Image (cartoon, rainbow, N blue to C red):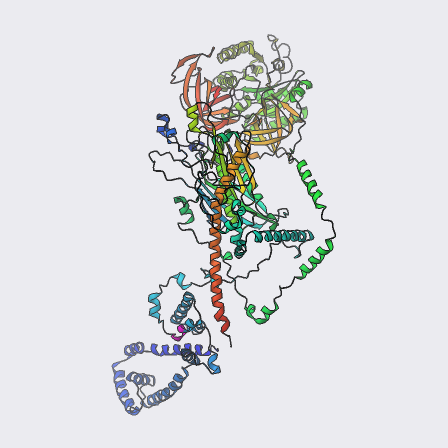
Amino acid sequence: MNTDRRRINAPSGGTTPPIFARTVKVPGYLESLRPSRTRGPNELRKIFLQTGIIPSASGSAYLEVPLPRTSNSSSLIPPRSSLKITCSIQGPKPLPRSAPFSPSLLLTTAVKFAPFASRNRRGYIRDSIERDLGVHLETALRGVLIGERWPKSGVEVIVTVVEGDEDGWWGDSTPGIGGGITGSGMGAGWGLLNILAGCITVSSAAIADAGIDCVDLVSGGVAAIVRNPDTKKKEGEKGDFVRMLDPCPAEHQDIVAACVVGYLAGRDEVTEIWLKGNVGAIPDELIDGATQAAVGSLSVLKEVVMEAVEAKFQGQVIQEKEGLKRKHPQQDAEMVG
Amino acid sequence: MPPKSGHHRAKNVDYEEDDVYSDDDYYENEEGGGMTDEDREQMRIGAIKVKEALNSSITVSDSQIQEALWHYYYDVGKSVTYLKNKHAPATTTTQPKKQKAVSRFDQAVSAASTPKKPETGEQSAFLMPPNRIKELCTAPSLKCTFQSRRANIKDFDTNTGASECWASAEYPCLYPIPDVMDHVPLSAAEFFRDTPWLNVPTHRLGEITVEPLFPRGGLLGGSSKPSKLAALAAARKKKQEEAKNATSTSTDPGDMKAEADKAVALLDRLSVKSKESASPSSALVQPQPVEQKSAQSKYPSRKRSQTPTTAFQESETPTPEPETSAPVEIPHLRAGPSMFASTLCGITPLPVKRQHLDSTSFPLPYTSTRGFTDTNPFTGPSPDDIVLSARVKGNKSKPGPNKKPNGNKLAESVEKLSVEEVPKVKSKNLNVVEEFEKSGMKRMANFVVIGHVDHGKSTLMGRLLYDLKVIDQRSVDKLRKEAETIGKSSFALAWIMDQTSEERSRGVTVDIATNYFETDKTRFTILDAPGHRDFIPNMIAGASQADFAVLVIDASTNSFESGLKGQTKEHALLVRSMGVQRLVVAVNKMDTVNWSQDRFEEISQQMTAFLTAASFSGKSITFIPCAGLTGENVTRKIEEGKASWYNGQTLIEALDASEPAKRSLEKPFRLTVSDVFRGSITNPVSIAGRIDAGSIQVGDTILSMPANEAGVIKGVEVENEPVDWAVAGQIATFHLAELDPVHLRLGDIICDPKKPVTLTKSFTAKILAFEHVLPMGVDVFRGRMSAEANVTKLVAVLNKGTGEVEKKKVRIVKPGEVARVVVQLDRELPLEVGVRVVLREGGNTVAAGLLEMCS
């Protein structure tokens, strides 16, 4: 817990997530509401991505993993969380005079959760989780930018998580994202991986929007090893494991391990990797899955970036055509007097 | 084209308008108003005469005649000559004017209407873009402005060649005002349509762009020439690119076409690997959706050798090799915007408004001239290139194969590198427990001095320090002098402990004062607690650091009794509940009762009765008669004859006799922050407090709770002396590094990061009630720390002696009862099992308790 000690805070008691009466009265009610994975183990959730949402920034993008439309609205408990991330790029701009000389572009990343981004409210000061995500994101992006082309300048990548993936379903013991409140949730933080993958993809789109030179488009992907719920029931004790791409933590009760990568598909390079949980002897399977998920999100990223580029160049092409038309008669007319 | 004609025209218009304006209504009124009947008669006669005289040769209106008569005071002759003069030349002057009005502009227009015939040189001068002509004829009247604007608008809308423009010039009057007003709704945006502060049509935006050939490799603001190194790098890059191009053209002819659109081509290169690796023929064809049995190969990532079999493979089909399935279909993953997204981004995807990217290049005027195109200065290599190529040639002799071993070396050295976080403060890595045993340190004891207000706690401690020569004579004399000046000479000794100006002027201790002294056996730390009831929280903070307590009681009449009702009682109960076992009762101010044995006995009896009720054991209470002001029986024995009845210990002997408290050295490090301050410039963050458990040394990492921030111990001071380590029981000062003072507050717990204190929001405690305890709101105190809380549940009332459950389903806990309750905190506090807490409510201590269970 990192309390904000510089100002008077709102009452600390008021931010516990709501408990619905029926979940207490009817045992197993929450479990009955638990969303189940309808897509295949190798299928990703759909992604909405849009660049150029913030006019004042030099580049910006918005990423969302929208909820599938569900008709089941008998309960007030919100279904699963959807991911909503915005990213804005400031710069490249010259470093302040006071800053020491830097021969290449200085990259600064900041990840901030909105106070309402998770079930447990978050503070206004960046806490350790947010800083941690920022460092991860910086690692993912640093190798992608061609920094030598901007000596003495800096660029800021500012990511705001408007809504984040939770670490589990409502009844699950893990509190908050990454145990944000109690500080001791070691097993938690599955949602963080999804958030990081989203951050990587959205900042990649924003960087492309800003027109900063990159070696490739980096994209994020998550894969997890999940205990198979069906076999568990049959055999009783230990279920076997299944690899899932793009796991939604609310849908899986037992995530054994998960991995997020920042992946450059064009160069087959991994810029960022974050493994969590009990991976087992060989993590390759998991990393493979994560890269596959990254390739999946790249397909959307590429499409969106292409569209943005086309929109930009379309105007130019029309312009050039017009210019040709005009030029012709102008050359004929002679200016006298 | 001379602008003169247009100007003239405008002038003429003005004159005409003036003529129109001059009607006579105004004058008539004035005339009628100022004339008498006589005047009218004269006017009538005069007018007839003038008409006759003018003889209809000149047509003059009646009113003009009347006016003339009025001016010449009904003189017929003068009026006639005036009228003749005025009206006869007027007809001649208007004639030339009308001829002049057929201006060059009109000629131009007429010439324009027959554009095929312009032969004369003069007419060719009017060959101008139509809008230019329009602009020239902008008269001050709004009408014309509208016309020209309308023409402009039309130009931009149609955007066609010159012929159409001419057409609009043919009919300069096509757009009369009402027409414009009707059809063009004049909003402000429309009116200022092409002004620079609004949306200027992109094709009218000028931008001078210099397209760089390559991104600059050099530094900003440096010389324009790249450095040698940069040149070499550029050359190498160029070679590589050429090589790459050669291969790509050989394999994929389709790429050549794509070269035209560089941006798109670049993106194409980002495509999935397998696409690239596919045969050139298939690369040209759009990847066809191939039927796949499962979604296995949806996201082929990389070419890899067979993945080693893993435990997971049993449950799963092996991952397909991307190489085998050449063109792959990536499922459509793109989702439509949700409600939120469509609000955020706009329902239709916004057209990208990035003007600098639209890049409307504005051709410079001289680019079309023949001379410019012919010279083409960039055909040959630039002077810089010539120099550089010459240099490259010169350097070629340098051996190339050197590079390979170099690269290996580099790889080796990189492998050797290992990232090691170097802590800023070096730890000596002492085994503190061993060190401590070796040092054979004297026993250490911290005691808190408690008692009712004005019972002489501070004075007694001041006397103790003075007599033990901790404070020298000089400073005591100085204090005595100061005290006398404000008429409180008896406070001089108390001022040794009370050092702030507020404490001195009010004559009461406000905050805990700490001081040290040493006897032959033991090193003592005094914690002088405030007696006033307003400062009980400070007293609790002090008591939480103490091993034993000295209870000071005023022996003088009434004082003892009032104390027993007041803080003597409360303090005694508090220290007991804070875990203090041993109590030295100093019966102070014996000099005021003439060392009366009866009084001493009385006080001892009453206090023993009370203290045993408060579960102090009789053995651990010692009563000492003394007098702090005079110093008798503090360190030296009572003078002969005064109290022959007493032959027990002095106060200092009683303190020495106290058994040392057990130290929990092996437990994880815990410290309660009792002070945060700026030690010096070199030590900006310092804290002080008693080490509750464990040991610490310089260089150790610590964790501050509840802020959960880590820091490093830069220095340790015990009793104002820098040391390398400190152990439980010591009250020490720590200088910290890498920790912001924002994260430190009084009462925070500093702990070992490996075994941190857990933050608790609710706990079960065994409490001793001082007042009635109901499920209610209370303040929980633990040392300096406090938090609002609620007693949520009264679990049971316990037996005082055995601790067994006496009664379940408790509604109320009466004073003096021991009970088990559940307390819910408003915010999380670092609490552990075994910690003692005090519950207070509205300035009164309600209960004190021991934590039994955290949850």
Residue B169 part of the magenta segment: yes
Q: Position of residue B402 (x, y in %)?
A: 72, 46
Residue B214: percent from left, percent from top:
60, 55
Look at the image and say whether residue A116 sits in the magenta stretch.
Answer: no
Q: Which residues are magenta?
A: B167-171
Inspect this view and state whether residue A55 appears.
no
Image vertical order of residue A228 relative to residue B23, above or below: above
- The one nearer the camera, B362 or B773, is B362
Residue at the spot 59% in from the left edge and 16% down from the top edge: B662
Where A308 falls versus B450 (above or below)? below
Quarter of the image for residue B815 reads: top left
Relative to B688, B109 lies left or right: left
| Residue A105: image location, x then y, percent | 59, 47
Query: Does residue B781 sit above or below A45 in this rendering?
Result: above
Q: Look at the magenta stretch and give its main secondary structure.
A: helix
**In the figure, B361 relative to B244: above or below?**
below
